[in-house]
């Protein structure tokens, strides 16, 4: 499976731009450690993030706030520094990010938001659009910029 995963070049370029502009970038992912970490490396994401936190490695799954805390630490930050969570799963990514005190961007992929859930701060169609949105964002946390995308 890791050999089949590709990341769109515009996403990789946007992540590089995000880091170059001072953002810390991390990945929080549910799944088996070996599988997810290989996907991250083989897709080119590993060179464009400051830290990764995979549930199979740490024994904690999204939406548990502790996995977001670990991801922030691996990026050299604390959740209290502020940040954003980009994700496509309403409960794991968006509700989990909100519970962790992060602002959120839901990657809708043209789906409707689930009724009864607290909406994300922003909604976009795809990951590249979420990163582009952040590149223009003027919001800063107390300790600097922070970003914790999913996958």
Image (spheres, rainbow, N blue to C red):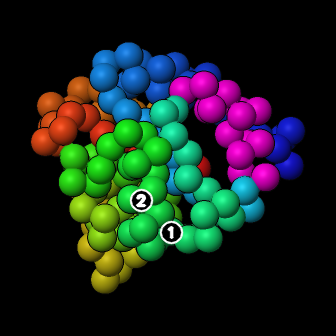
Q: Quadrant of residue 63?
A: bottom left
User: Residue at the location (47% across, 20% down)?
Assistant: 16
Q: Secondary structure at mark 2?
A: helix
Q: Earlier in the sequence, mark 2 or mark 1?
A: 1
Q: Quadrant of residue 32?
A: bottom right
What percent of the width, then of the height, locates residue 134?
A: 30, 34
Do the CB atoms of the residues marked 2 and 1 lie less than 8 Å apart?
yes
Our reading of the magenta stretch's main secondary structure is helix
Please state if 13 lies on the left or on the right of 24 as rendered: right
User: Residue at the location (86% across, 49% down)?
Assistant: 1
User: Residue at the location (46% across, 51% down)?
Assistant: 71
Query: In the rendered image, which residue does mark 1 sit on?
Result: 62
Residue 63 position (above or below residue 139): below
Q: Secondary structure at mark 1?
A: loop
Which is in the foreground here, disc 2 or disc 1? Answer: 2
Q: Which mark is residue 68?
A: 2
Is residue 18 in sight in this rendering?
yes
Magenta stretch contains residue 23: no
| Residue found at the far bottom of this picture | 116
User: Residue at the location (76% across, 33% down)?
Assistant: 42
Q: Which residues are magenta?
A: 34-48
């Amino acid at each position: 499976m890791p050999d089949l995963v590709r990341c769109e070049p515009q996403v990789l370029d946007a992540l590089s731009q995000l880091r170059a502009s001072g953002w810390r970038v991390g990945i929080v992912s549910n799944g088996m450690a070996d599988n997810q970490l290989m996907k991250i490396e083989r897709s080119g994401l590993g060179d464009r993030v400051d830290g990764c936190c995979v549930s199979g490695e740490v024994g904690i799954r999204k939406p548990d706030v502790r996995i977001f805390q670990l991801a922030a630490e691996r990026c050299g930050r604390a959740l209290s520094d502020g940040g954003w969570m980009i994700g496509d799963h309403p409960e794991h990514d968006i509700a989990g990010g909100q519970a962790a005190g992060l602002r959120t961007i839901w990657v809708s992929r043209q789906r409707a938001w689930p009724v009864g859930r607290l909406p994300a701060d922003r909604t976009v169609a795809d990951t590249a659009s979420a990163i582009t949105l952040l590149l223009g964002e003027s919001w800063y946390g107390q300790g600097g910029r922070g970003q914790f995308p999913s996958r």
